[in-house]
Amino acid sequence: METSNFLNETALSTDETEPIVVVCAADNNYAMPLAVTIRSAMENFNSSRQLLWFVMDGGITKRNKNRILKSLKSEMFTSGQFEIRWLPKPEVFDNDVVLSDRLPSCQSLPNAAFYRLVLPEVLPKQFRKAIYIDCDIAINASLKKLWEINIEDYYLLAAKNINSHTISHPEAGLLNWRELGFSPDDKKFMSGVLVFNLEKWRANNMCTKALDYLEHNMHYIRWHDSDVLHAIVKNQWGAVDGKWNFYKGRPLTKEEVDSAFIIHYISPAKPWIAIEKTNENNLFFHYLRMTDWSGYKHTIPQRLWRRLKRENKKIRSKLR
């Protein structure tokens, strides 16, 4: 069952020779924020372990991959303490355009968001645990702290839903929670930052179960990959401090930004799109200046042009 309190932030046993494994999934539109996410993790990393970062590649161009690599040049990179590896798009998503065709709620969501569902199968089998992180994030603390939280016998660790929504919530819950055997008061988690128990996922064929659920329950899905994860994991997840996936739905105070471990830019007004200056957006641009995109500005004409491209993409998708 999901724990009511946060898990103990000390692992029962840790092998200091094992790398800390982190995974992101991104397409070319998210190349720049991906660079910010990784660079922010490197800047706050305080461990002697290797930080091994996998990117499930949803179509990042060679030029942008080179820009990402230039963004990560540091002592950690040159010493070998940090390594980035590119994973090809999972074969099961080769025709993933059907996701936006069949899931109207996902038309503005990158298909790469669903790649996490097969993460345990695409990673090398030698790894027993992995952190998954969305790439619209700024990391403000050492991922070593998250890595060392005891995962116990859970399928995954996650932060509870920021609004403490239950699985039966009329807007945020699962449409078929009764059929799946949930209790109405069961809690939801946020899927943007997860720690996967890879061994348990593989032992119970959870990736196959996730894809089967996605295939046969399209008419129930409102909240994308999150609905799938809740349905197959049920309540077998452990809660971590909400600071590991911090979002308030309003501008944050400087104190909130400073105390958060991870800031998640969930709203459509991403910092690289929004014109407004906020404390959390300032944090994003603090790390952006350390990347090859330093000096990036989002002007009103650029904003209108990007909006036009997004609308055009939706129209083309509907015409297929």
Image: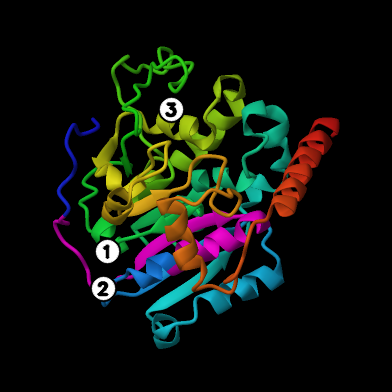
Label 3 sits on what residue type? Ala
Picture coordinates of residue 131, whole percent (x, y) = 38, 55
Instruction: Check whether the beta carbons of the residues at disc 2 and disc 1 lie within 8 A of each other.
Output: yes
Where disc 1 sits, the SS reads: helix
Residue that badge 3 annotates = 231
Which callout, 2 or 1, points at the residue further toward the start of the chain? 2
* Relative to 176, residue 23 above or below: below
Which one is nearer the viewer's eye here, 262 or 158?
262
* Residue at position x 53%, y 52% in the image: 271
Where disc 3 sits, the SS reads: helix
Classify mark 3: residues with Cα within 10 Å, few (<14), some (14-19) or many (20+): many
Residue that badge 2 annotates = 47
* Residue at position x 27%, y 72% in the image: 46
Where disc 2 sits, the SS reads: loop
Which callout, 1 or 3, points at the residue further toward the start of the chain? 1
- Tell me the mark number nearer the camera, choosing from 3 and 2: 2
Verify whether residue 35 appears in magenta. Answer: yes
Check the picture and name the quadrant holding the C terminus.
Answer: top right
* Residue at position x 39%, y 48% in the image: 193
Which one is nearer the viewer's eye here, 207 or 229?
229
- Identify the coloring: rainbow
Q: CA distance from mark 2 to mark 1?
A: 7 Å
Label 1 sits on what residue type? Lys
